[in-house]
Amino acid sequence: MDSLISAAAQALATGDPLGALKRIALRNDAPALALRGIAMAQLGDLVRAKTLLRKAARAFGPKEALARARCIVAEAEIALVSRDLSFSGKALDAARATLERHGDPRNAAHARHLEIRRLLLIGRLEEAERALSKFDATPLPPALRAAHELAVAGIAIRRLRINQARKALAEAERAARQAGIPALLAEVETTALVLSTPAARLTAPGEERAVLLEEVEALLASGALVVDACRHVVRDADATVSLTTRPVLFALARALAEAWPADVSRSRLLARAFRAKHADESHRARLRVEIGRLRSKLKALAGVSATALGFALAPRRARNIVVLAPPVEGEHAAVLAFLADGESWSSSALALALGASARTVQRALDALTTAGKVQSYGRGRARRWIASPAPGFTTTLLLPGPPPRG
């Protein structure tokens, strides 16, 4: 490695892309192309960065497997940042294995962290936890320790282990400051804001208010019967019933919970569950069937009893019933939730994260664009969508996984 390449690499390692480009901007050999690609990525020109890295990977000879593996890892990082989640996990795994085989543990660890972050984005928490459990962060350099602690915090936040998340973020901040990379420190600070920003709306008898993640954690441990519209489950301290794939049953459960301790009329339940403006006997018969199914599903948590007006919900063990709802609801709310992280997403990445078809996601994006709620740029496969976050809310609880299906 010549002195200019070495100096450029050192500049990039400390978060100084302009310093790196001053040394290699006019060079077109493979190492310079790779470093230029990384520099452009740090400057935010991800399209140019991706092109340069691919040129570098092709330019390295057949005996330079290590260099090509580093290019693959860098390209995977760009794909992750640009929310192109369709990048090949097999290619990244192969690159990581090559890095480990050639004695480059730092970049191998970086490759594994990229895969963990991808798993977090698409909601595969168990796989992310298993991958993270294989790490000993102690020997990692400060930048990778910060990335490791950010992954730990990401899992803890999604698991609603807020004390663990705070400790991980404090460790991440220490490591980021030690690394001296402003962008990394900014990422830690942005992640920490999630803990101090309202994450959901709580509806209980006589009140409705925004709640923080810490309050959500306390609520779920309080013993209350929680109808969770963020994850489409009903739970108390001892049991959880998922209604993710039963949207009609969940709509009924939520309507009954919002009215508790009062009952809900049959006409209102028909409107909420079936959107029936003019109910006939077939609607009323279907309501009886669905109420029976709901009663069976919730038998360990609550009873559903008929009243003169309609139906009422009564908890078996809990003293009260509350509803936990996303900050933003309505048609295409799940798509808006992902876009509200401030990053640009491809339609294929949204489809993967939502567990929906590409056509369904594209229709939602078209509708949101027409309504002025999202914007797009680029064309074809390079097209990306972005939206501003909902003011004053975090999106963590808006990302529970695939939406309910009928």
Image (tube, rainbow, N blue to C red):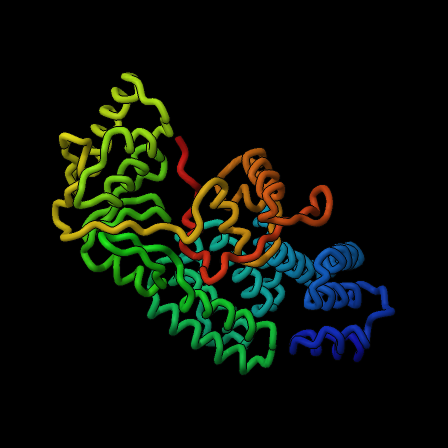
Q: Image quadrant of residue 41?
A: bottom right
Asked if residue 297 can be seen in this view, the reply is yes
Side (left or right) of 376 relative to 232: right
Q: Residue at x 61, y 58 (%)?
A: 81
Q: Residue at x 66, y 48 (%)?
A: 376
Q: Residue at x 62, y 54 (%)?
A: 344
Q: Residue at x 84, y 65 (%)?
A: 29
Q: Position of residue 58 (x, y in %)?
A: 78, 54
Instruction: Find the residue positioned furthest to the top.
Output: 281
Question: Where 209 sits versus 4, above or below?
Answer: above
Q: Image quadrant of residue 27?
A: bottom right
Quadrant (top left, top right, bottom left, bottom right) of the C terminus: top left
Foreground residue among 131 and 322 = 322
Q: Position of residue 99 (x, y in %)?
A: 61, 63
Q: Image quadrant of residue 114?
A: bottom right
Side (left or right) of 175 relative to 278: right
How many numbered discs, if any? 0
Q: Position of residue 178 (x, y in %)?
A: 54, 82
Quadrant (top left, top right, bottom left, bottom right) of the N terminus: bottom right
Foreground residue among 402 and 394 = 394
Foreground residue among 168 and 357 = 357
Asked if residue 87 can be seen in this view, the reply is no
